Amino acid sequence: MGDSLTDWISAISSTIAAAISIITVITVYVAARQLLTEHRAYQMGLSQNTLGPWHDKVKTKHLLGLQQEICTPTITLPMLLKQDWRPNFVFPSGVQLGRLDPEKALAKAGWVNFVEALGLRPQDDKFYHMSAQPTLVNGIVPMRWAGKDRE
């Protein structure tokens, strides 16, 4: 009787251990897939294609390239006016006035195009300052507006 009880407890313990192992493997697989998806979105958000001429300003590497810092341009109207900014509204690169395809233009809308349309370039660092950004928002480097957004 003692041996059959021990065998029965051993069988139940083995079954429970196998179930826990399967659940652990599934959890690790799902977590790894999620991390890879987030990493891909993160890299796409920081790519040269997405950030254009702002790529080197936004993404900087430290510690022999092992650590990267994300910064966003912060633009304020007082800062623009204090530096005697003259509006020079232009179409962002890639948008040509005669051949405007609204579907393609909207797909590439973002703060990079907005800043470029204002006539600001990464070299014009007197019109903005860079602020550290802890993370991307939905795979996009966010733009910060410092000031009142409504009366």
Image (cartoon, rainbow, N blue to C red):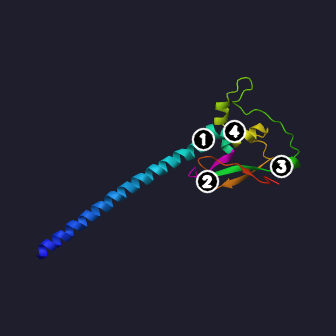
Residue with the mark numbered 1 = 47
Circle 4 residues within 10 Å: few <14, some 14–19, many ≥20: some
Q: Are marks 1 and 2 in contact (CB under 8 Å)?
A: no
Q: Locate the N terminus and report the quarter of the image it occupies.
A: bottom left
Instruction: Examine the image and state in which quarter residue 107 appears.
Output: top right
Residue with the mark numbered 3 = 77
Q: Does label 3 or label 4 sit earlier along the sequence? A: 4
- Labels 1, 3: front one: 3
Q: Locate the C terminus and report the quarter of the image it occupies.
A: bottom right
- The answer to if 18 sits in the magenta stretch is no
Marks 1 and 3 sit apart, C-alpha to C-alpha, by 28 Å
Residue with the mark numbered 2 = 135
Residue type highlighted by circle 2: Thr
Numbered range of the magenta stretch: 57-68
Residue with the mark numbered 4 = 53
Marks 1 and 2 sit apart, C-alpha to C-alpha, by 15 Å
Q: Does label 1 or label 3 sit earlier along the sequence? A: 1
Q: Tell me which residue sits at (32%, 62%) in the image.
A: 20
Circle 2 residues within 10 Å: few <14, some 14–19, many ≥20: some
Q: Does label 1 or label 2 sit earlier along the sequence? A: 1
Percent of width and height locating residue 110: 68, 41
Q: Tell me which residue sits at (59%, 49%) in the image.
A: 138
73 and 96: which one is in front?
96
- Labels 3, 4: front one: 3
Residue type highlighted by circle 1: Ser
